Structures are given as structure tokens and as C-alpha cells.
Amino acid sequence: MIGHPSRARTAITVFVLAVALTGCATAPAQLKDSAAERLQSGVQDVTASAATGDLAGARSALGDLQADLLAAAAAGEVTGQRSAQIQSAINLVDADLDAAIEASKPVETVAPAPEPIPTPTPTKDAKPGKGDGKDGDEEHGKDKDD
């Protein structure tokens, strides 16, 4: 049993891909036996990697499977309709692998940057002993001293 939810989902999607290819094998007019064998082997590679949690290996095997499908289509070994069905299944597996890879990345907890402490801007009035003469202290100071 697969313990991690993303691995389980990927394995289920790979199973869907395998079923799509199994259906292909029963319709020789849509997929030649040699192409079906290559594609099924590719699905097994993807499945084995995904089941063990080797997401990079599953991604690589899926790329190989994609290349095999394109080669089979170019060689006329698979019909356009069946190729589209298999491609749809490959796209599902690819999306699940993306999600599983993203979910497996460690979550970075970044502490928010401390907010700078505002430094008060001194005013002329705030400087001790440095009156600007506008507040009347100097005039009153002269009167007080006299």
C-alpha cells in the first residue's frame, strides 16, 4: 500500500494510463503489437518509479513514454484517435507528477523581516539649548536674567 497521498494519486493515474494502453492492445487496428509492448513497458517504468516515491525517475520514464508514443504515431503504429487517448492519459500522469513533486518540496519558513524602528527626526525646537528665537525664549531669557 502506498502511504503518501500524492504517491497514491500518482499511482492511480498511472494505473489509468495502463488501462488506456491495455485497451489499445485488444484493438490491433488502432495500435500495433510492437508499439503496444513498448508503451506498456514504459507505463511499467513510470508505475515502478512512482510507487517507490522516485518522482524524478517517474518523470524521466514518462518522458521516455512520451517519446515512444510520438515515434509510434510517426511510424503509423498507432492511429490518431488512440494516440490522443494515450496522450490524454500521459497528460494526467504528468499533472499528478507535477503536484507530487511540488508537494514533496520542503516548505521554507521565512521569518518576516523585522520592521525598521523609525528614528525620530530632531527639530530645531527639540534640541536642548538651541532655541531658534521664534518661541520667545531668548527675549524672555534676557528679561529673566536682568
Image (cartoon, rainbow, N blue to C red):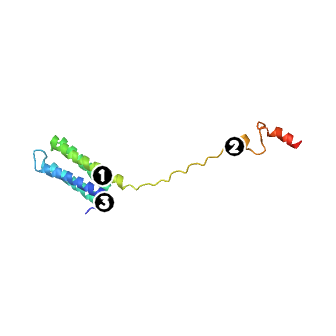
Query: Which quarter of the figure is the C terminus placed in?
Result: top right
Image position of 11 (left or right of 80): right
> What is the C-alpha distance between the residues marked 2 and 3?
60 Å
Q: Nearer the viewer, residue 140 or 76?
A: 140
Does dot 3 land on a helix, a strand or a loop? loop
Does dot 1 land on a helix, a strand or a loop? helix
Label 1: which residue?
A: 97
Residue 42: x and y in percent read 22, 53
Image position of 23 (left or right of 46): left
Residue 22: x and y in percent read 15, 52
Residue 17: x and y in percent read 20, 51
Residue 111 lies, with reference to residue 146, above or below; the image says below
User: Sequence-wise, which precedes: disc 2 or disc 3?
Assistant: 3
Label 2: which residue?
A: 122
Which mark identifies residue 4? 3
Residues packed near mark 3 inside 10 Å, few (<14), some (14 to 19) or many (20 plus)? few
Which mark identifies residue 73? none
Q: Are marks 1 and 2 in contact (CB under 8 Å)?
A: no
Q: Amino acid at mark 3?
A: His
> What is the C-alpha distance between the residues marked 1 and 2?
59 Å
Q: Nearer the viewer, residue 145 or 51?
A: 145
Query: In terms of image quadrants, where is residue 103?
Result: bottom left
